[in-house]
Structure formats: C-alpha cells, structure tokens
Amino acid sequence: MATKSVKSTKSKSETKVCCGTARDIPLSKSDAAELALVFAALSDPVRLRLLSIISSAPDGEVCACDLVTPIGKSQPTVSHHLRILFEAGLVEREKRGVWVWYRAVPERLDAVASRLR
Amino acid sequence: MATKSVKSTKSKSETKVCCGTARDIPLSKSDAAELALVFAALSDPVRLRLLSIISSAPDGEVCACDLVTPIGKSQPTVSHHLRILFEAGLVEREKRGVWVWYRAVPERLDAVASRLR
DNA sequence: TTAGCATATCGATGCTTGTCAATATCGTTT
DNA sequence: AAACGATATTGACAAGCATCGATATGCTAA
C-alpha cells in the first residue's frame, strides 16, 4: 500500500449518488461488463468497417448484399459480424423482401462515446 | 445486389478528400485495425474498472499496489491489464521508487470518443 | 410448385485472450 | 551484504472468437 506524502485534502467526493451529476463514481462490475460488451463489438476491424460503411451511406441504410464484396470476407462471416453489431445495439435491421437493410444507431454511438467522458 | 427504388438523388457526397471536413469517408483497413486495438483494450470489464478507478482518483493518479485488492484478481493479472491499457495509450505510468503510479490520458479518451461521432 | 437468390445458422478449425502460479527484476531497508 | 516488498514477466491452460464450407430458411419469380 502506498500512502500519499501529505495532501489529506478532505475531498469527500461531491458525488450525488442519486439524481445528480454522478461524477467520478467507479463502475460497478455489472456496468463494466455491460459496457465491455459494446466495446467488444467495436474491437474488430471488419465490424468497424461495416459500421463505417453503413454510417456513411447516402440514404443512411445499406443492403447486406452490398457489404460482402467491399469487406472482402465470406458471406457467413459478414453475416456473423452484422449480427454482433445488431446485438450490441449499434445497428438496426429491416427485412424488405429478400433483402435486409442495415442502419446505424447514432444515439447508441453517442451514448457509448459519452461514457468515455 | 439491391438497387434503391427511386431516389437517384445525385448526392455526390460532399467529402473533401484532403484538408477539409472529411465526413463519411469509410475507414481504411489500416485505420480500422488501429482503432480496433483501442476498443479491444476497452473490451474487458477488469480494464474498464481499472480505468474508472484511475480516472476518478482525487489526485488523478493511483498506485498499482492499490488496484489489486479492489479489482479482486491476482497481481499478475492486474499487471497484465494495466500493460494493455498503457500500450493502448489510455493510461500513462511513472515509477517512483518501488511503486508505479498510473494516470488516465483524457485526450486519448476524447480522441477515441470522437471517432464514434 | 419449382428454381433461384439473399441471408442466417451450423460445425469445425486455428488463433487469440484472460487467468493464475511460479519466477524474475529492481528499489529499499536493515 | 542480505532480506523484503512491489511490479513485471513467463509458462501453461481453458475459454472465447474469427473464419470458412456446407447447409438451412425464406422470399420471389417463372
């Protein structure tokens, strides 16, 4: 255990536990586990590129069939990654006929970004 | 291949390739790989809690010796996770005598957060 | 109904990763 | 010098993951 030289600055940590600006309150184990799942979904280059392509689509949505070729992986692999992005809440999907269209969920991205301060 | 019903909205994508606001330009493979490394560092609950504890420290720094007990993992495991956070540029460390003090790197966190839009 | 295409799921495989015990490294103190 | 404590590294193992081929599901057109 290391003890700070002097500085016993009674910083009672002005954290309002409820309904206030809960600043600098360490993550609980369950919160950390939940957050880690989202970051895990973002921790793969293929998924980041998928998300990037989908986010930058002129119409805000992309057909899954248009993702396989630019990604350069097999169709099952792309489908697998899209599934992970979907389950992490980072994209939403809509089936129209034979095709499935994917859209980004910017609120989700903002929420994650704000957790990084 | 799916083709949009109508909507051939000549959106030439006002992306300035150089020196402008490079909006909605899909990530390159190398950029995606680099970003994925940072997210991988954030994709573990233990590392998120470490980062949280360090970030919320009153003095902005925490001795490694004060991290083992609250995390509840073995000392080598905690050391391993701190190493990954360090190599991702998320924390910096300073050795003082026998102890090693860890600080968060908020600029790095901001940079990552901004990549999420 | 049958054929054909888009997408998802399954099963297998090789690689990565989280974890710990044991050990090494390096200050400090006696 | 030797002993001790803090931290990092090593080696090993189990669990998880990315990937693909093969297959299943489901929609549409003939």
Image: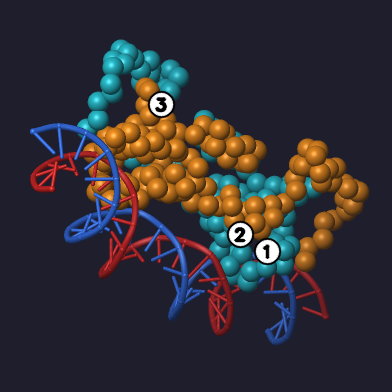
Chain colours: A orange, B cyan, C red, D blue
Going by the numbered disc 1, the residue's amino acid type is Ile
| Number of the front mark, 3 or 2 | 3
Q: Residues within 10 Å of mark 1 (few under 14, many from 20)?
A: some
User: Does B91 appear above or below D23?
Assistant: above
3D distance between C-alphas at marks 1 and 2: 7 Å
Tell me the amino acid under the disc marked 2: Val
Residue plotted at (84% across, 56% down)? A5
Q: Which residue is mark 2?
A: B46
| Residue A24 relative to residue C19: left or right | right
Q: Earlier in the sequence, mark 1 or mark 2?
A: 2
Which residue is drawn at the image coordinates 63% and 71% (left, top)? B74
Mark 3 residue element: loop
Q: Mark 2 and mark 3 in contact (Cβ < 8 Å)?
A: no
Pointers 1 and 2 in contact (CB under 8 A)? yes
Q: Dot 2 falls on which chain? A: B
- Per the image, the residue denoted by label 3 is A60
Q: Is residue B64 left or right of residue C18?
A: right
Residue kind at label 3, given as amino acid type = Gly
Asked which secondary structure carries label 1, the reply is: helix
Provide residue B64's location: percent of width, then percent of height: 68, 61
Examine the image and state in which quarter residue D8 appears. bottom right
Q: Are marks 1 and 2 on the same chain?
A: yes
Q: Secondary structure at mark 2?
A: helix
Spatial distance from mark 3 to mark 1, Cα to Cα? 42 Å
| Residue placed under numbered mark 1 in the picture | B71
Report the side of B63 relative to B73 (left or right).
right
Q: Is residue B79 visible?
A: yes
